[in-house]
Amino acid sequence: MTSKIKVVVVDDSALVRSLLTQIINQQPDMTCVGAAADPLQAREIIRERNPDVITLDVEMPKMDGLEFLSRLMRLRPTPVVMVSTLTEQGAETTLKALELGAVDFVAKPRIGVSAGLQELADDIVDKIRIAAKAHVRRLTAGPVAAPAAAPSNPAAAASSTPTGVASGTGLLRLSTEKVICIGASTGGTEAIKEILVELPSDAPAVVITQHMPPGFTASFAARLDSLCRIRVAEARDGERILPGHAYIAPGGRQFSIARSGANYIAVVDDSPPVNRHKPSVEVLFRSCARVLGPNAIGVMLTGMGGDGAQAMKEMRDAGAYNIAQDEASCVVFGMPKMAIQAGAVQDVLPLKQIARAIMERVAASGVRHRI
């Protein structure tokens, strides 16, 4: 008989602790083995109960959640699901938590907490199940710094015409516009960052669907924009997809691309969830297969489930070059595994090799870039 997932709940709200404990204990495959009001209590419970997963509030007394998470991931790496308030500050703190090693997060409402958490019960327990299987790593280094070689005016370089000579670089641009198409879920925020920070300012356009709720993608895009040589922003309906830019699907919206004359444009709409996701990788990748054909470079990163696998096979059938992240470097080897099994990818690579593989593929198309 399979043992139950042991969960420790850490939250300074007695109501939230009670609700989360109840939600967890109602599941046949998990049990709450302890609840703590602050990190100091949590430390003793974790030492005694050895949990498989910890749910952790961000804002707590005595030691804030980020400091506690940082210590935990250095000394006793354990899968953590963060419980964050749905605010701009909460979004920024959550992204820092993911950088420190948290597997995923749940956005709790600011008002109506009891009803809100009950509505989120299925999402909470799904994320605990995913976290229990996740590959967590010991925290050994601080956040990635901004690239030292960032250009003085990346916006000007990025908005150059796609043909001819790139302004200020002396490097030839593409005769046809390649587009890098990325899909990700659990663990994807850090994986996406690792790829984008390696791309040169004159890289092809990047379109991204990361499973993320409303209220978080704007902060995610702003954080990446501060780190990368390319420009990064949430996608806006109708805008042109330009080289040197990355476009992130807004949380709670579907994102795809279309053609307008010789240009690619973003389509952002309120169409229904696909594979239970909104945004969905399937929606983006299917449009990439249809619109880009052999001009697409597809990348499937860490995540649970199979969203996007079949559409990625459509991309390959249309002539795209596709990469899947390998199991060893994934937090959750679900989406890449399904893409591989679908026959959708040509290469399976460690995360640290993907950016170089992308730019080598671009160079093979007749363009030289700094890598």
Image (tube, rainbow, N blue to C red):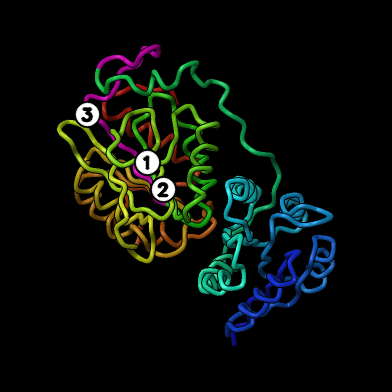
The residue sitting at the bottom extreme is 1
* Residue at which label 3 appears: 176
Secondary structure mostly seen in magenta is loop
Tell me what residue is drawn at x 84 percent, y 66 percent.
Answer: 41
Do residues under tags 2 and 3 come within 8 Å of each other at their CB atoms?
no
Tell me what residue is drawn at x 50 percent, y 50 percent.
Answer: 215
Magenta region: 164-183
**Who is closer to the viewer here, 25 or 363?**
25
Mark 1 is surrounded, within 10 Å at the Cα level, by few (under 14), some (14 to 19) or many (20 or more) other residues, namely many
How many numbered marks appear? Answer: 3
The image quarter in which residue 238 lies: top left
Instruction: Give, as a three-letter code, the residue at label 1.
Output: Ala
**Above-or-below relation of 6 to 195:** below
- Measured as percent of width and height from the top left, residue 172 is found at 30, 17
* Residue at which label 1 appears: 235
Q: Is residue 324 visible?
A: no
Q: Is residue 146 visible?
A: yes
Instruction: Give, as a three-letter code, the residue at label 3.
Output: Thr
- Alpha carbon distance from label 1 to label 2: 7 Å
Do residues under tags 1 and 2 come within 8 Å of each other at their CB atoms?
yes
**Who is closer to the viewer here, 20 or 78?**
20
**Who is closer to the viewer here, 115 or 82?**
115
* Residue at which label 2 appears: 250
- Measured as percent of width and height from the top left, residue 315 is found at 25, 50
Specify which label sits upstream in the sequence, 1 or 2: 1
**Above-or-below relation of 18 to 1:** above
For label 2, the SS is loop
Specify which label sits upstream in the sequence, 3 or 1: 3
